[in-house]
Image (cartoon, grey):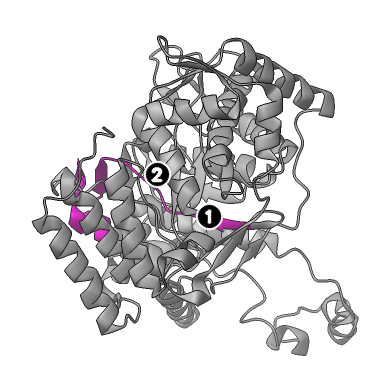
C-alpha cells in the first residue's frame, strides 16, 4: 500500500503540474512530415480544370453590388439581372499568383506572433457555436460569461496559438456584441484575435480595437496582419452580401481572410467526393480572386471543409472517412495554388464522449497529414458546430499537445542511442535506476493533461473518474486559478473608452446593407 500511495502522490503532482502549465510550452509549431497525397497529380489537375470550367461556364451568384463592380472592372463577365459572375481562367490564375504563400500573424503580445505556411502551422479554438455546455449546467445558449471563460482557457493552454470567437454571446444585443466580445478577447488574452465579417462597421470597430491593443498606427496595422476572419460561401455557388463585403474589407485592410466553402456531399455539393471537392475548389477560387482584385497581395488562405451527410437524416457528419479523405485532398489543392491551407478538428457527437474523441482524431489526422497550416475548431467543437463544450475543450487540448509532441520526431545521436546505458544495465537488468534514465526521466516522455495511467485499483480508490470527468475538473481549476496577461492600464482604458463610446452611439448594423 505504501508503494500505491507513492504512485498516487506522484501522479497527483504530475497532473497538478500539467493542469497548471498546460503541459506545453509556447512555441511555433512545425510539421516535419511530408503531406499525405491521396490524389495523383493528374487527379489534382482534373479537379482544377473542372473548377475553372465551372467558373467560366456557370459562374457564381454574388449578391454584393460593389463586389460585382470590382470583378467587372477586372474583366469578369457579369449579368446584373441574375447577379451571376463568370470568371475567366486567366483572371483567376493571375489573381491567385499575387497572394502570399506564408503569413505572419501579429498578436498584441509580440511573443505570441505566429507564422503559417510552409511547414509552420497554428492551432485555433472552436469558433461560432450558439450554445455552450458542461457537465453540471448542460447545454444552454451561449453567454458573454461563457465566451470569456473559453477565452481564459485559450489563453492558459499554450498549445492554442490563435483565438476564435468560441461561442456566441447571445445575451448581448447584436449591435454591440462585437464590441463586448472583442474587449474580452483583447483583455483576457494576448494571442491573435478573430473578427466576424458581419458588416463594414463592426469589422472597422474590431480593426480599431486591435490597433489600440497593439499600440500601433493604422498604416502599420495594414502592413502587419493582426486579426483574421473566415468567409463561408453559401454553397452551392453563391456569396452573400456580408461575406462578399468581408472579403473586400479584409483584403483592403491587409488582414487574413480564410475562404472556406461549406460543401457537404449529398446536400450542398455533389454526393461524390470528387464532385464536392471540385465545387469546393471553384467556390474557393472565386472568393480568393475577389480578394486579390480588392487588395492585390492581401493575405488569404484556402479553406477545406468538405464532408458528407447522414443520408438517413440529412444531418451533417464529421470526422468520417470521407471527411478525412477530403481534408487530405484539400491540402493538395491548396498547394496547387501555393496558398496556406485551413482545415478543422470536428465531430458530430452530441456529447464529449468516445464518439467525439474518435471522430476528432480522424479529423485531426486528415488535417495535419494533409498539411494544414490553420487548424480551426482545434479545441471545444461539439454537436456538428452547434455547441462549444468545456470538457471537449480540455480533451482536445490533450490531443493537440500529443500531436505537437508527435511533430518533434526522434532525436538520433550518440547520447540518445544509449549504448553506455545498455552496457551499464547488461543482460537481464532494468533501466529504472540507470544513470541515463535518471538524467532524463522527468522530460523523456509526453506528460498527459487528462490521461490517467495509474493501475485500476489506484484509479478506483481516487474516485474512478473517466476522462470527461477529469476534463471537467481541469477546466474548472484553470478558470479558478486564471490570471489575465499583463496589459498597460492606458491601453485598457483606451479600449474601454472606445467600447463605451461606440455603445453610446448605438453600435453597428450587422445586416450587411
In the rendered structure, find residue 381 and report the number of the disc placed on it: 2
Q: Is residue 473 visible?
A: no
Q: Quadrant of the N terminus?
A: bottom left
Of pointers 2 and 1, the one earlier in the residue sequence: 2
Q: Position of residue 18 (x, y in %)?
A: 46, 73
Q: Quadrant of the C terminus?
A: top left
Q: Residue at horizontal 84%, vertical 82%? A: 415
Tell me how far mark 2 sits from mark 1, CA to CA: 13 Å
Q: Position of residue 166 (x, y in %)?
A: 34, 51
* Residue underneath mark 1: 399
Q: Residue at horizontal 66%, vertical 21%? A: 88
Q: Position of residue 51 (x, y in %)?
A: 66, 20
Q: Residue at horizontal 35%, vertical 71%? A: 213
Q: Is residue 141 magenta?
A: yes
Q: Is residue 440 visible?
A: yes
The residue lying toward the viewer, choosing from 507 and 104, is 507
Q: Position of residue 476 (x, y in %)?
A: 28, 65
Q: Residue at horizontal 62%, vertical 30%? A: 326
Amino acid at each position: 500500500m505504501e508503494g500505491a500511495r507513492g504512485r498516487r502522490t506522484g501522479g497527483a503532482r504530475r497532473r497538478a503540474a500539467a493542469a497548471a502549465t498546460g503541459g506545453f510550452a509556447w512555441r511555433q509549431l512545425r510539421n516535419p512530415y511530408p503531406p499525405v497525397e491521396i490524389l495523383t497529380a493528374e487527379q489534382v489537375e482534373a479537379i482544377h480544370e473542372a473548377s475553372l470550367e465551372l467558373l467560366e461556364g456557370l459562374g457564381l451568384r454574388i449578391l454584393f453590388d460593389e463586389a460585382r463592380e470590382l470583378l467587372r472592372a477586372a474583366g469578369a463577365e457579369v449579368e446584373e439581372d441574375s447577379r451571376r459572375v463568370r470568371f475567366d481562367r486567366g483572371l483567376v490564375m493571375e489573381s491567385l499568383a499575387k497572394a502570399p504563400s506564408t503569413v505572419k500573424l501579429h498578436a498584441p503580445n509580440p511573443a505570441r506572433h505566429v507564422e503559417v505556411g510552409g511547414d509552420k502551422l497554428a492551432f485555433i479554438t472552436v469558433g461560432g457555436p450558439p450554445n455552450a455546455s458542461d457537465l453540471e449546467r448542460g447545454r444552454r445558449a451561449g453567454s458573454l460569461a461563457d465566451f470569456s471563460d473559453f477565452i481564459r482557457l485559450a489563453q492558459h493552454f499554450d498549445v492554442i496559438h490563435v483565438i476564435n470567437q468560441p461561442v456566441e454571446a447571445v445575451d448581448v444585443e447584436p449591435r454591440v456584441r462585437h464590441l463586448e466580445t472583442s474587449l474580452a478577447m483583447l483583455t483576457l488574452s494576448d494571442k491573435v484575435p478573430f473578427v466576424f465579417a458581419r458588416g463594414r462597421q463592426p469589422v472597422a470597430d474590431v480593426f480599431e480595437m486591435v490597433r489600440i491593443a497593439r499600440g500601433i498606427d493604422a498604416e502599420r496595422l495594414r502592413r502587419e496582419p493582426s486579426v483574421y476572419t473566415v468567409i463561408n460561401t453559401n454553397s452551392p455557388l453563391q456569396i452573400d452580401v456580408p461575406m462578399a463585403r468581408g472579403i473586400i474589407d479584409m483584403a483592403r485592410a491587409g488582414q487574413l481572410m480564410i475562404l472556406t466553402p461549406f460543401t457537404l456531399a449529398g446536400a450542398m455539393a455533389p454526393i461524390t467526393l470528387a464532385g464536392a471537392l471540385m465545387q469546393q475548389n471553384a467556390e474557393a477560387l472565386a472568393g480568393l480572386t475577389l480578394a486579390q482584385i480588392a487588395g492585390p497581395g492581401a493575405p488569404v488562405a484556402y479553406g477545406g471543409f468538405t464532408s458528407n451527410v447522414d443520408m438517413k437524416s440529412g444531418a451533417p457528419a464529421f470526422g468520417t472517412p470521407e471527411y478525412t479523405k477530403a481534408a487530405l485532398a484539400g491540402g493538395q489543392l491548396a498547394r496547387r495554388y501555393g496558398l496556406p491551407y485551413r482545415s478543422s478538428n470536428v465531430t458530430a457527437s452530441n456529447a464529449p464522449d468516445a464518439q467525439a474523441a474518435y471522430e476528432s482524431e480522424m479529423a485531426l489526422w486528415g488535417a495535419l497529414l494533409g498539411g494544414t497550416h490553420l487548424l480551426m475548431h482545434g479545441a471545444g467543437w461539439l454537436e456538428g458546430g452547434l455547441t462549444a463544450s468545456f470538457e471537449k475543450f480540455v480533451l482536445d487540448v490533450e490531443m493537440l499537445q500529443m500531436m505537437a509532441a508527435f511533430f518533434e520526431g526522434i532525436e538520433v545521436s550518440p547520447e540518445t542511442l544509449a549504448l553506455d546505458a545498455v552496457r551499464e544495465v547488461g543482460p537481464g537488468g532494468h533501466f529504472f535506476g540507470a544513470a541515463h534514465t535518471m538524467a532524463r526521466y522527468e522530460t523523456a516522455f509526453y506528460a498527459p493533461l487528462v490521461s490517467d495511467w495509474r493501475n485500476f485499483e489506484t484509479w478506483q480508490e481516487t474516485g474512478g473518474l473517466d476522462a470527461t470527468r477529469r476534463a471537467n475538473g481541469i477546466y474548472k481549476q484553470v478558470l479558478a486559478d486564471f490570471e489575465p496577461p499583463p496589459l498597460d492600464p492606458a491601453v485598457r482604458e483606451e479600449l474601454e473608452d472606445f467600447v463605451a463610446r461606440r455603445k453610446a452611439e448605438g453600435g453597428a448594423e450587422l445586416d450587411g446593407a
